[in-house]
Image: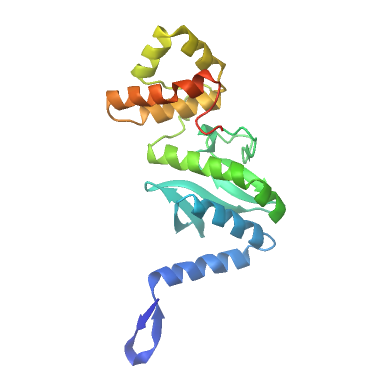
């Protein structure tokens, strides 16, 4: 949309200017412009907001950073800010460097690879957005295998041996995802209800977003 300016010229509205900058970013991201455009499409289809940060399209949920496009030298990818928290059954995410504690990146070298990974990427983005809205963060002072569990979850683990065995058999990523989801509820009754709702999946050895 445009609006009039003195002298009769038409000035782009802010959303048009932002869209133009993002399109210019993709054009300038050769040779990865097509791959990054597909990654952007996938993320936006998950309902995230798009902002410009650090000169690149950045995707947010609940006002928190979730992911950002990442054109690299030999690959391109989608960088997830708190990727260490995610349950990643397809193994798409990897640390961007040897000392990375929080961020993870899914790397690609062609459009076909992005499209093949679309279902798994969609699940990861939705999982990351849910954790962002719940205020989840990576505890950089703790070991990544540690999970801070709400009192309601500890009580259920203490009272139900089968549930405890199923919980302990889950991968650290799956446990972390559940614990953060449960703890994200403000009221004890809501935390208990979340635990009860997901108990069948835990007993079946599934993560929150497993089919």
The colour scheme used to paint the residues is: rainbow
Residue 160 occupies quadrant: top left
For image coordinates 44% across by 47% down, the residue present is 65
Q: Is residue 166 above or below residue 194?
A: above
Q: Is residue 1 visible?
A: yes
Number of numbered markers: 0
Of residue 71 and residue 172, the one placed in the foreground of this image is 172
For image coordinates 61% across by 32% down, the residue present is 89
For image coordinates 50% across by 53% down, the residue present is 45
Q: Is residue 109 visible?
A: no
Q: Is residue 134 above or below residue 122?
A: above
Q: Is residue 65 above or below residue 201?
A: below
Q: Is residue 30 left or right of residue 206?
A: right
Q: Is residue 16 left or right of residue 123?
A: left
Q: Is residue 79 above or below residue 9?
A: above
Q: Where does the C terminus fall, quadrant-wise?
A: top right
For image coordinates 51% across by 47% down, the residue present is 67
- Residue 86, how many percent across, how many down? 53, 34
Of residue 166 and residue 74, the one placed in the foreground of this image is 166
- Residue 71, how many percent across, how many down? 63, 55
Q: Is residue 109 left or right of residue 42?
A: right
Q: Where does the N terminus fall, quadrant-wise?
A: bottom left
- Residue 22, how many percent across, how many down? 52, 65
- Residue 167, how many percent across, how many down? 50, 17
């Amino acid at each position: 949309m445009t609006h009039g300016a003195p002298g009769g010229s038409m000035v782009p509205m802010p959303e048009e200017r932002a869209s133009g900058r993002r399109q210019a970013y993709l054009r300038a991201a050769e040779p990865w412009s097509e791959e990054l455009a597909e990654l952007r499409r996938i993320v936006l289809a998950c309902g995230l907001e798009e902002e410009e940060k650090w000169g690149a399209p950045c995707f947010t949920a609940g006002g928190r950073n979730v992911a950002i496009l990442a054109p690299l030298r030999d690959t391109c990818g989608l960088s997830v800010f708190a990727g260490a928290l995610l349950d990643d059954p397809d193994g798409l995410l990897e640390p961007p460097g040897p000392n990375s504690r929080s961020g993870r990146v899914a790397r690609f070298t062609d459009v076909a690879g992005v499209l093949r990974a679309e279902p798994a990427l969609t699940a990861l983005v939705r999982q990351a957005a849910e954790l962002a809205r719940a205020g989840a963060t990576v505890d950089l002072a703790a070991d990544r295998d540690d999970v801070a569990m709400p009192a309601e979850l500890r009580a259920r683990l203490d009272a139900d041996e089968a549930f405890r065995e199923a919980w302990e058999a889950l991968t650290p990523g799956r446990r972390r995802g559940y614990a953060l989801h449960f703890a994200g509820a403000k009221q004890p009754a809501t935390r208990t209800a979340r635990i009860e709702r997901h108990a069948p999946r835990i007993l079946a050895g599934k993560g929150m977003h497993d089919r």
